[in-house]
Amino acid sequence: MPSLKDLRNRIASVKATQKITKAMQMVAAAKLRRAQMAAEAARPYAQKMEAVLANLGAGVSGADAPRLLAGTGSDQVHLLVVCTAERGLCGAFNSSIARLAREHINRLQQAGKTVKILCVGRKGYDILKRQYDKQIIDVIELRAVKQIGYVNADEIGQRVMTMFANGEFDVATLFYSQFKSVIAQIPTAQRIIPAEIPVSAASSTATYDYEPDEATILSSLLPRNISVQVFRALLENAASEQGARMSAMDNATRNAGEMIKKQTQKYNRTRQAMITKELIEIISGAEAL
Amino acid sequence: MASFPFELVSPERVLFSGNVDSVVVPSAEGEMTVLANHAPFMSAVRPGVVTVDGGKRLFVRGGFVDVNAMGLTLLAEQAIPVEEIDREKVAADMKMAEDELRAASTDEARTLATEKIAALSAMMAAVRS
């Protein structure tokens, strides 16, 4: 049976925790709005890029297609770019991305492929290093970055491009969490090298004039596309992270409230029991006289 | 004059979207004015100024123009309205890029710095004119 003082302390500490989780929830809500706006603002660019690529990609195919589009011809070495958050306390956000990546890795390893992992974000690295320390080639931290800009994504894109040019891998897959709503974030795997070209319908029938020629444009468009995809992944991730944190912290606040209620009830009962006990003692003492 | 839809998008935001009469685009092989009913056309963009309807001016760097029946789309890696360019910041960046060029030891770094300087001087020219 905890003493009254213990109970009081416990209630105070839960109240302090509740204040923190409440504050975190509100901060996440404010950040979510901004992150969501950024993610939505980036969508038109990625969509247009896809449309242009679809147009171009349909025209250039076969043996003379660039390697970024057609691949190296083998799929022995896989690069997984795993994008996660820099901070924890956001529910299952980080672990669900890591789980998807882990399933992917296991499948590839069973098929006898070589796997290399590039972690973007500290948390994913923390989770994956326990099992795949040897496969992780590097960690890119974005902790210092407040608002993710295209520059950050471009750096990662360039890095992946250089590795591809050096023949360090054949297939690259991007892991991130797609933002659907505050309560739904979908961990997604997206192949970026060789590029997945959406099959366009009627739009490719138009005959285009190219300046300079098709191949030149395509070869400068494809690397840019990778940076754009990374950028989109990072933005979707940022929004998802805040969304996940918001709902996790909302739950935490509610749980804390419940706990406070229970403990307060217990505290009051104990207090009353003690008062009753004291009264009985006084009364029976007086009666004995 | 017939108008057509024009969209200027950078990865971070949509800078311009609406119907216009004419757009001057700094394409890779020279300035080019696009009017309504232009033939389908695609080109790379060099650093320079996009002029919308002879008035609004926007600086763009790196990207593509895509003209088709649906209108003109410009995908720019970086885009900023000319009046928002900070002259002092450009000058400071220019100095930094020049230092980089001097310090560059590999061919790659040199090309990168030269490209940067070219973009910045185009930006400067845009502010001055």
Image (cartoon, coloured by chain):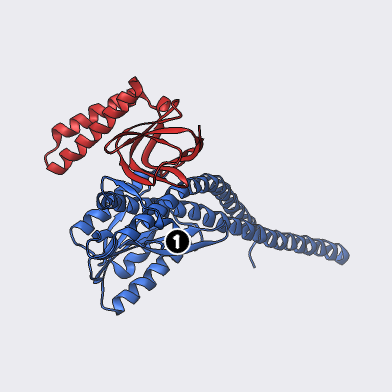
Q: Where is residue A263 in the image (x, y as percent from the top left)?
A: 67, 61
Q: Tell me, yes or no, if residue A234 can be seen here.
A: no
In the drawing, does residue A132 fall left or right of residue B57?
Answer: left
Q: Nearer the viewer, residue B82 or A257?
A: B82
Q: Is residue B115 above or below residue A5?
A: above
Q: Is residue B12 above or below residue B96?
A: below
**Residue A267: x and y, percent?**
70, 60
Output the letter for the chain in blue. Answer: A
Residue drawn at (63%, 64%), measured in percent from left and top? A2
**Numbered-mark total:** 1
Q: Is mark 1 on a helix, strand or loop?
A: loop
Q: In which quarter of the image is the C terminus of chain A?
A: bottom right
Above or below, B14 relative to A123: above
Label 1: few (<14), some or many (≥20) within 10 Å?
few
Q: Residue furthest top?
A: B128
Mark 1, chain letter? Answer: A
Colour in which chain B is shown?
Answer: red
Task: Between residue A39 and residue A280, name the one nearer to us.
Answer: A39
* Towards the viewer: A250 or A101: A101
- Identified at 26% across, 37% down, the residue is B29
Q: The disc labelled 1 sits on which kind of residue?
A: Ala
Q: Disc 1 marks which residue?
A: A201
Q: How far from the left and from the top, in percent, is residue B19?
A: 52, 37
Quarter of the N terminus of chain A within the rendering = bottom right
